[in-house]
Amino acid sequence: EDQVTQSPEALRLQEGESSSLNCSYTVSGLRGLFWYRQDPGKGPEFLFTLYSAGEEKEKERLKATLTKKESFLHITAPKPEDSATYLCAVQPMDDYKLSFGAGTTVTVRA
Amino acid sequence: DAGITQSPRYKITETGRQVTLMCHQTWSHSYMFWYRQDLGHGLRLIYYSAAADITDKGEVPDGYVVSRSKTENFPLTLESATRSQTSVYFCACAGTSNSPLHFGNGTRLTVT
């Protein structure tokens, strides 16, 4: 069974204080690893897809990286608008369903 | 409006009642999904579908029924609601088997 573990559960940052979120996964052949952002009362919003170890993707202050066992979401010089829950999901090679981690809730204080 | 919409946005029902949550998408995407989100568990897959008339069980299907007679609709029915089914339910769709999922804004269901 595919497993996704995210840490920490919650992260409180000062504006400008860079940090990283971790997503550890176990899957029988990875088709893709997905990062989503979720704001309160809304559905998750797609950020990145990573397909192979060593791959990196960037969007504004966010950068996602992938190894064979984990992915990191780096937040550089965060702003209050980066406050959200960040979700990681994996898709196995032999299916199209996504299995999600429980998420990391990031709060950025001005 | 283009996109994926869920209805109702909020629903309160009593234990034992049948309730149907609606999901409609305007992209004609083949793949559709139902997840529930609970504190401490994250998003858990209930049912998913690759096309009309094709559905598969996810991680937590017990007590739920789905149908997919049309590509654009994927209703989720709780046959006899229980308090443990109090949750936020999200519907999602994707155009191909490895495309990112597009999510609706959820239905918050309370079973009393």
Image: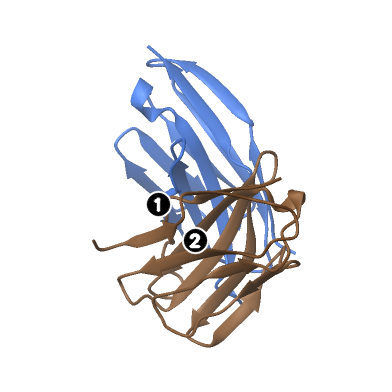
Question: Does B85 sit above or below residue B51?
Answer: above
**Cα–Cα gap, marks 1 and 2:** 14 Å
Q: Is any atom of residue A65 visible in this view?
A: yes
Identified by mark 1, the residue type is: Phe
B34 sits to left or right of B80 = left
Q: Foreground residue, B71 or B99?
A: B71
The chain letter under disc 2 is B
Instruction: From the image, tell me which residue sits under label 1.
Output: A46
Identified by mark 2, the residue type is: Cys
Instruction: From the image, tell me which residue sits under label 2.
Output: B91
Q: What is the residue that sits farthest to the bottom in this orientation?
A: B53
Question: Does B25 sit above or below residue B71?
Answer: above
The residue lying at 44 percent from left, 61 percent from top is: B101
Q: Where is residue A46 drawn, in percent x and y?
A: 40, 51
The residue lying at 71 percent from left, 64 percent from top is: B59
Q: Residues within 10 Å of mark 2 (few under 14, many from 20)?
A: many
A70 sits to left or right of A14 = right
Q: Where is residue A99 drawn, in percent x and y?
A: 62, 59
Q: Is any atom of residue A52 visible in this view?
A: no
Q: Where is residue A14 drawn, in percent x and y?
A: 44, 13
Task: Give the chain coloured brown.
Answer: B
Task: Give the chain coloured blue.
Answer: A
Res A102 quadrant in image: top right
Q: What is the residue that sits farthest to the left in this orientation?
A: B1
Where is the N terminus of chain A found, in terms of image quarters? bottom right
Secondary structure of residue under mark 1: strand
The chain letter under disc 1 is A
A98 sits to left or right of B18 = left
